[in-house]
Image (cartoon, rainbow, N blue to C red):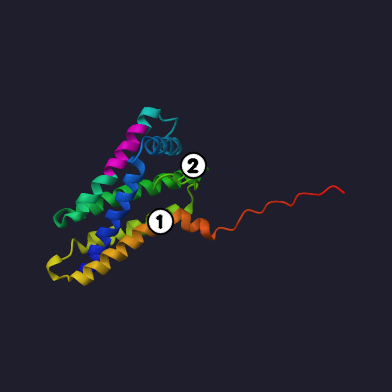
Amino acid sequence: MDYLALAARVAIGFTFLASAVSKLHSRSARAEFATATATMLAAVLPGRPAPARSTVVAGVVAVAELAVVPLVAVPDLARAGLALAGLLLVAFTVTIAAVLRRGTRTSCRCFGGSSTPLSGVHLVRNAVLLAVAAVGIVLGPGDLARVTVAGTTVAAVTAIVLGLLVTRLDDIVDLFRPAPVTPARRRDP
């Protein structure tokens, strides 16, 4: 169980680090995330949120995601970090569900510049991440005195692979989506 606890912490930490960095790495990334946040807030809140408010919300989200990383890295704070991740995931899931229910079309800026529109796939992804955070909370930080280097390496690599799959989910789903059918052009005799 110590390895599972460690894997949960690493997976959540890696995923939230990738998410925060993708939103904060450039001025255009921050602007794109703020625009997507404004669209999502408009679907969740009555009336049109002020652009300044959505910029503040986008900044708070990115900083909160970044805060998860050191929290899950420190064993005594791991449950707090996983709880913060869980709260963020619940908020993201509720927001995505509201966007989908209202039929608002906006892209997922969860991990950077994806142009993939929000869909049920994003709800499933968040449910999986929420389950990983819950497992980490239930198991606690684990007893690092009882783990081996080899076991720790396997747990960490597995968690990073899971994190990579989560962060590249839009690309993976696109690989399996059928190609759009374009009608054949009629030739004039």
Label 1–label 2 contact, CB within 8 A: no
From the image, which quarter does the N terminus lie in?
A: bottom left
Whichever of labels 1 and 2 marks the residue nearer the N terminus, that label is 2
The alpha-carbon separation of the residues under discs 1 and 2 comes to: 17 Å
Image location of residue 64, percent across then percent down: 27, 43
Magenta span of residues: 55-64
Residue 44 in view of the camera: no
In this rendering, would 46 be left or right of 134? right
- Residue 125 disc label: 1
Density class for disc 1 (Cα within 10 Å; few <14, some 14-19, many ≥20) is some
Density class for disc 2 (Cα within 10 Å; few <14, some 14-19, many ≥20) is some
Q: Is residue 56 magenta?
A: yes
Label 2, secondary structure: give it. Answer: loop
Residue 104 sits above or below residue 73 on the image: above
Residue 141 in view of the camera: yes
Q: Amino acid at mark 1?
A: Arg
Number of labels in the image equals: 2
Give the residue at mark 2. 106
Quadrant of res 130? bottom left
